[in-house]
Image (cartoon, rainbow, N blue to C red):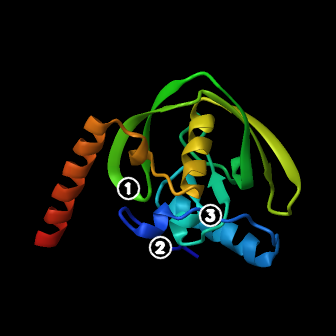
Amino acid sequence: MILPILSYPNPQLKQRSSEVVSFDEKLHNLLEDMYETMLSREGVGLAGIQVGEAKRILIINIPREDKKQYKEDLLEIINPKILKKEGEIFFTEGCLSVPNFYEDVMRFDEVEISYQDRFGNPQTLHAQGYLAVAIQHEMDHLDGVLFVDRLSMMKRKKFEKEFKREQRAKGKR
């Protein structure tokens, strides 16, 4: 089932998500719905809070060289914690909750995380580049942080101006 995605400036997006304690069918259904929702919007990642579920859940599916996403590459990351972070990278980010706005954000180039899979089994993952950036972006959502919150004051003002212009344009339709 495709779920509605919360959009900026919805205050729920600022909410800190809570730990998942029940790895049951309800969680599995939510993960499936999140995957369908993410693909329907051509996203590469989605956090639970973006669909109104304030749980420490995120999914990521990075496209391959052929620009397609394959379900076997899907990462379901529950209750993640960063163990290590190294290097820095500027990466142009966008967000399904902040549509039509893209900006460069400074992130760690490599991260190592611990997390649980859909069955509650402990996992670790070392990621770099695009995947590391996607993980950090989605983990920010779990703490109520949007990528626009990480922008410099000048870039943030540019975003606010573009956002207001887009809102006015929608109102005139």
Q: Which residue type does callout 3 highlight?
A: Ser
Element at label 3: loop
Sort mark 2 into few (<14), some (14-19) or many (20+) by Cα contacts within 10 Å. few
Q: Which residue type does callout 1 highlight?
A: Val
Element at label 2: loop
Disc 3 versus disc 2: nearer the observer: 3
In the picture, the disc for residue 4 is 2
- Quadrant placement of the N terminus: bottom right
Sort mark 1 into few (<14), some (14-19) or many (20+) by Cα contacts within 10 Å. some
Q: Reply above or below: 24 against 39.
A: below
How far apart marks 3 and 2 lie (CA) works out to: 18 Å
User: Going by the image, does 16 lie left or right of 123?
Assistant: left
Residue at x-position 60% and y-position 21%:
87
Q: Reply above or below: 35 against 91.
A: below
Element at label 1: strand
> Can residue 78 be seen by looking at this rendering?
yes
The mark that comes first in sequence, 3 or 2, is 2
Q: Give how far across and how far down residue 171 sits, in percent.
A: 15, 71
CB under 8 Å between callouts 2 and 1? no
The mark that comes first in sequence, 1 or 3, is 3
Q: Residue furthest left?
A: 172
User: Going by the image, does 20 lie left or right of 128?
Assistant: right
Q: Give how far across and how far down residue 39 sits, in percent.
A: 54, 59
- Quadrant placement of the C terminus: bottom left
Q: Give how far across and how far down residue 109 sits, in percent.
A: 60, 27
How far apart marks 2 and 1 lie (CA) works out to: 14 Å
Instruction: Give the residue at mark 3.
Output: 17
In the picture, the disc for residue 98 is 1
